[in-house]
Amino acid sequence: MSRHLLLLPAPEAEWAELPPEEHEKGLRSHERFHRDLASGGHTVVTTSPLAPSAEATGMRPDGKGGALVTQGPFTESVEQVVGFYLVETEDEPDLRRLCMEFAARGELIEFRNLV
């Protein structure tokens, strides 16, 4: 059994301004993804949206034995990780296939193996 982290990047500012029907379309896409995962025998260990990156807190070494604490966002990227799935599977190729189908419906996804 292997575990995979499916990160969901999105342009937060654009996403926040989408009309309600686009958010509903996204919700239906995720519901279908859940059904597809279950039908394929893949186990969703946990999944969740994340609070906006502006609400994140970064903690880095300050070079003096302490920590520098800053408020986010921390990257210059237009896209931020807005949610994730942690999935357990015995069939990685099928999981990748389902992720590609999910992306083909207009969803952004980053597939990462846990080591």
Image (cartoon, grey):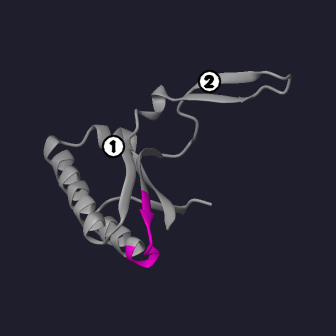
Viewer-closest of 52 and 1: 1
Quarter of image, res 88: bottom left
Image position, residue 7 (x, y; %): 45, 53
- Asked whether, in this view, residue 90 is left or right of residue 76, the answer is left
The quadrant where residue 107 appears: bottom left
Q: Is residue 20 above or below residue 29?
A: above
Residue nearer the viewer, 59 or 39 = 39
In the displayed structure, would residue 60 be above or below residue 97? above
Instruction: Report whether residue 105 is seen.
Output: no
Where does residue 82 sit, x and y in percent of width and height? 41, 43
Q: Residues within 10 Å of mark 1 (few under 14, many from 20)?
A: few
For this view, does 75 lie left or right of residue 41?
right
Q: Which mark is residue 14?
A: 1
Please give the residue where the numbered disc 2 appears in the rendered image: 70
Amino acid at circle 2? Thr
* Relative vertical location of residue 85 with respect to residue 69 in this rendering, above or below: below
Q: Which residues are magenta?
A: 87-94
Q: Name the secondary structure under disc 2.
A: strand
